[in-house]
Image (spheres, grey):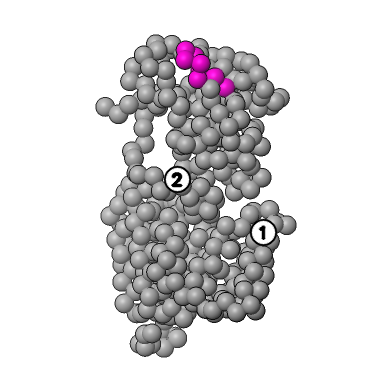
């Protein structure tokens, strides 16, 4: 546990100066860049409760903003800086799990600023109660954060998951469960989510996407055609094409394995699992959807923070050597549903 080197007024002044410096450094317009002063305040709070040396994260945040023009690299660098500072804070002050849980949830759920402030405050309170019930340990912090982080967006269900976790936690303590610490796995799990807090909504709804090896965004030959049931589209395969990029429309209720289309030659069947509904990962639709993340997801990242999502496009291998392919929407598609042919993905040159 660190010894305070500043008075509370000194820490408040440090937070204000850090926020002001980050505000002056902002060069880009994404919600994450715009929230850099807010992030600096939370980093200062980490330093206050854990170790003043963590204030070094603030100049690193400024350096990332000024020196990294590539958006993905810059936002990932900001997340990595915050995650390392958070992990150090857990190690230095494991008994401040209550404050650490609040900081983590503010980073993961409050960027961009939520529309339902009252609901978010209720989630913070429930997370804190879970942390206290489980003994204010790193494990308690991780459980409280997870309970609030993965909650659905629907108003009647938003508090259901953390309330259920709270009931289970209380029952476990009543029946003699000891105070678990599990420091390393607990801070590792939360720090992983914080590394990608710029796209935290996608972490909550499609975690496997972040476990894939990184790759450059491929070049596409755009088609953008939607096929209703039984409709077919014949396409000449462009030079260098290695896959078709397909998605569904109005099929979020389909379950894994449901047939949505066919590709000829080769009599290839396209199923949910190869593709998904284009918008199923949106915050407002995900928890009512039955679609899984496509096996070879080809969607594009959209939005930032807790509003981030990935469209449901998937890569489907082309029949080997075919100069022309025919894509047909399955006859079982209901009215209003379609198979979307987004384009061809070209091999890198």
Quarter of the figure with residue 346: top left
Residue 23 place in picture, x, y as percent: 40, 63
Quadrant showing the N terminus:
bottom left
Quarter of the figure with residue 79: bottom left
Magenta part of the chain: 261-268
Q: Nearer the viewer, residue 44 or 161?
A: 161
Query: Secondary structure of the magenta portion, mostly?
Result: strand
Q: Is residue 179 visible?
A: yes
Q: Is residue 45 above or below residue 199?
A: below
Q: Residues within 10 Å of mark 1 (few under 14, many from 20)?
A: some
| CA gap, disc 2 and disc 1 | 24 Å
Q: Residue at 41% of width from left, 80% of height from top?
A: 93
Q: Nearer the viewer, residue 113 or 236?
A: 236
Residue lying farthest to the right in this orientation: 156
Residue bearing mark 2:
209
Residue 118 place in picture, x, y as percent: 66, 65
Q: Is residue 265 magenta?
A: yes
């Amino acid at each position: 546990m660190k010894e305070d080197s500043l008075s509370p007024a000194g820490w408040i002044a440090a937070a204000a100066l850090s926020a002001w410096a980050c505000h002056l450094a902002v060069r880009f317009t994404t919600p994450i860049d715009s929230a850099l002063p807010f992030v600096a305040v939370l980093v200062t709070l980490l330093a206050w409760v854990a170790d003043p040396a963590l204030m070094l994260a603030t100049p690193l945040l400024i350096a990332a903003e000024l020196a990294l023009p590539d958006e993905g690299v810059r936002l990932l660098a900001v997340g990595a800086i915050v995650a390392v500072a958070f992990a150090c804070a857990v190690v230095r002050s494991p008994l401040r799990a209550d404050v650490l849980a609040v900081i983590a949830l503010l980073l993961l759920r409050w960027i961009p600023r939520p529309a339902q402030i009252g609901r978010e405050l209720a989630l913070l309170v429930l997370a804190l109660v879970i942390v206290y019930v489980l003994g204010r340990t790193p494990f308690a912090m991780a459980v409280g954060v997870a309970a609030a982080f993965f909650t659905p967006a629907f108003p009647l269900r938003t508090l259901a998951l953390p309330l259920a976790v709270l009931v289970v936690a209380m029952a476990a303590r009543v029946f003699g469960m000891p105070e678990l610490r599990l420091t390393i796995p607990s801070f590792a799990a939360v720090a992983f989510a914080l590394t990608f807090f710029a796209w935290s909504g996608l972490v909550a709804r499609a975690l496997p996407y972040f476990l894939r090896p990184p790759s450059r965004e491929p070049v596409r030959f755009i088609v953008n055609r939607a096929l209703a049931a039984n409709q077919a589209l014949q396409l000449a395969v462009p030079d260098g094409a290695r896959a078709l990029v397909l998605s569904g429309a109005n099929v979020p209720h389909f379950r894994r394995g449901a047939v949505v289309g066919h590709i000829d030659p080769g009599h290839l069947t396209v199923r949910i699992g190869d593709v998904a509904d284009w918008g199923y990962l949106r915050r407002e639709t995900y928890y009512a959807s039955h679609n899984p993340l496509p096996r070879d997801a080809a969607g594009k990242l959209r939005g930032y923070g807790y509003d981030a999502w990935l469209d449901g496009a998937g890569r489907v291998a082309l029949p080997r050597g075919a100069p022309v392919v025919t894509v047909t929407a399955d006859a079982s598609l209901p009215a209003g549903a379609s198979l979307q042919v987004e384009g061809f993905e070209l091999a890198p040159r």
